[in-house]
Image (cartoon, grey):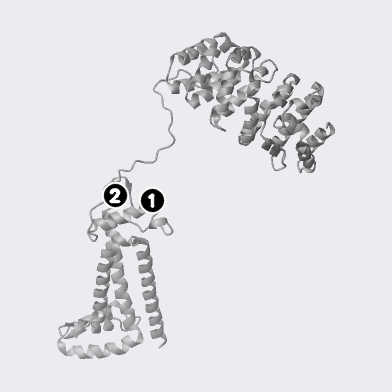
Amino acid sequence: MGRTREAGCVAAGMVIGAGACYCVYRLTWGKDEKLWDDEEEEEEEEEEVGEEACSDKPEIGGKTEKGVKTNVGVGAGAKPQEDSKAKADVKVGPENGPGVKKEGQPESQGGGGLEAKAKALFKILKEQASAKAGRGIRFANISGSRTLTSSLPCPGGRGGGCHPGGRRGSRARSRASGKVKRKNRSKSTKAPATAWPVRRGKFSFPYKIDDILSAPDLQKVLNILERTNDPFTQEVALVTLGNNAAYSFNQNAIRELGGVPIIAKLIKTRDPIIREKTYNALNNLSVNSENQGKIKTYISQVCDDTMICRLDSAVQMAGLRLLTNMTVTNHYQHLLSYSFPDFFALLFLGNHFTKIQTMKLIINFTENPAMTRELVSCKVPSELISLFNKEWDREILLNILTLFENINDNIKSEGLASSRREFSRSSLFFLFKESGVCVKKIRALANHKDLVVKVKVLKVLTKL
């Protein structure tokens, strides 16, 4: 009984393993239910035929097929020679049929028949799997663009495949097998997703944008910029000139070659990229004091464009940087005094980077006592006081505290405290000096966690 029981356990394990393999196979290859409906029906019919082949007893020469199979499985350790002898004995005359049947019954009860059934079922499943694998080999190419292997899909892959084409590959194989009676889907005509548009010019620029050019080469680039209307060529020429303007010897060369008016004329263009590159080139040139004398002609135009362009855009940042460089000295600050209210509005509305750059610009004005009266008399939004909140980072707090400190010092030095009636309640003078709200906000920053901010606050409070 021990060997019989062992044989039964082995047979049961084979049946369970075969069922598990079949389930995994169906899960990985049969996810598209719409395309595999007809195929599943035919597979069920094949399974029924297989079961009937295992259960029914069709007579062959007076013998039962079941009797033959149970006789084949006599004993778990039966040899192939004995197996062939049993088959030969069964085929001898009809008189041996009942004897064979009687011998087969006790052995099937002992587990040999169960093992034979398991082998037969496993053989059927293996044939089905090989048939499907064969279809995959024959129809491996999809639309001539991808090639699928005949192996099983990778487990865990979405859609049952190792790559995006796996799911479509299984569909193509099912259609090609003839079991799904549908027309092949036409090749997709959907245009691929395009990236952000990139400028492409046909003109071959004679220099690289990071080349350090001599005076004759700079003259060639200026001539190209003056004559061309192609945006791509203009952009490359402006970047080349801007990079060369970072060097002091080329700053003088570009001015002497008449390059400032040629570059500045592109401020009027509608292309924001060209305007940004123009401001960057002028910004590098404005480091030179002699070049500032040439650029001052266009400073009002730059200021107007900076205020009306899109908020927090690259053009606006480039314009603010140029205005900041032009107001480092006191020579040209009066040309921008009419834009003080716009600067403070931008200080409130802009993002973090716009706020910092605008503060740097306004601080340049606060360092000139002659601009104090015009500065404190301009109208400012009352929400500007929110910049003194401790939630802001160190850079913004240090800049706004510096701005307040400079204005407070200039009011004292210019004697404007006695003429407070000249200023309206919406003016910067009233917000910083008379309301008292600003002083309360600054005192609240005395306990700030940042040591640098704390030191700056104490310095400002000692001057009040």
Crowd band around label 2 with a 10 angstrom C-alpha radius: few (<14), some (14–19), many (20+): some
Pick the residue in front: 360 or 231.
360
Determine whether, in the image, residue 148 is placed left or right of residue 85: right
The amino acid type of the residue labelled 2 equals Asn
Q: Position of residue 159 (x, y in %)?
A: 39, 57
Pick the residue in front: 253 or 230.
230
Above or below residue 42? Residue 172 is above
Secondary structure of the residue carrying numbered label 2: strand
Q: Residue at x 29, y 52 (%)?
A: 140
Please give the label number shown on residue 62.
Answer: none
What distance separates the C-alpha of mark 1 from that of mark 2?
14 Å
Q: Quadrant of residue 156?
A: bottom left
Secondary structure of the residue carrying numbered label 1: loop
Please give the label number shown on residue 164.
Answer: 1
Spot the residue most to the front. 421
Task: Tell me the quadrant of the picture where the C terminus can be found.
Answer: top right
Does the image show residue 280? no
Give the residue number, with chain letter if any, for mark 2.
Answer: 141
Q: Are marks 1 and 2 in contact (CB under 8 Å)?
A: no
Q: Position of residue 170 (x, y in %)?
A: 32, 56
Pick the residue in front: 235 or 318.
318
Q: Residue at x 29, y 89 (%)?
A: 105
Pick the residue in front: 22 or 43.
43
Above or below residue 190? Residue 110 is below
Q: Position of residue 191 (x, y in %)?
A: 34, 41
Does the image show residue 172? yes
The amino acid type of the residue labelled 1 equals Pro
Q: Earlier in the sequence, mark 1 or mark 2?
A: 2
